[in-house]
Image (spheres, helix red, strand yellow):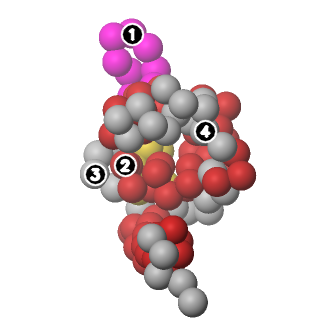
Amino acid sequence: MANTNPAFMSGVPELLVLRILSDTEMYGYELVRAIRICSAERIALAEGVVYPALHSLESRGLLKSRRRAVDGRNRIYYRTTAKGIKRLNSIVDDWQRISAGINDILGGQHA
């Protein structure tokens, strides 16, 4: 797996966390693994990135958490709220617009 360039990653954790948690609730480490799997190992966010993102998104009302006992362990599961879905849709629109412009330039579609 290639190293991820931090300069390109601004805003990406928020986007990925909201998107993945919009489908199903997960606990932190499960989310870390899901990001790796869903990106075919191209994106690996460390727990030190994901957990602060989860806490920040929850404090902003974009995620909701609940504690659940699983196999004798307490885990905190997160899911996207309605406010989080609205934020996700906004970020996706921005991301698609910007990536389309970058692809145009990389593909030679510039003046």
Q: CA distance from mark 4 to mark 2?
A: 19 Å
Q: Main secondary structure of the magenta part?
A: strand
Disc with the residue nearer the chain's start (4 vs 1): 4
Query: Where residue 26 appears, x then y in whole percent?
Result: 38, 37
Q: Do residues under tags 2 and 3 come within 8 Å of each other at their CB atoms?
A: yes
Disc with the residue nearer the chain's start (2 vs 1): 2
Q: CA distance from mark 4 to mark 1?
A: 35 Å
Kindly tell me whether residue 61 is visible in this rendering: yes
Kindly tell me whether residue 94 is visible in this rendering: no
For the C terminus, give its image quadrant.
Answer: bottom right
Describe the element under mark 4 as helix, strand or loop: loop
Q: Which numbered dot is residue 72?
A: 1
- Which residue matches tag 2? 20
Q: Do residues under tags 1 and 3 come within 8 Å of each other at their CB atoms?
A: no
- Which residue matches tag 3? 23
Looking at the image, is mark 4 or mark 1 nearer the viewer?
Answer: 4
- Which residue matches tag 4? 4
Describe the element under mark 3 as helix, strand or loop: loop
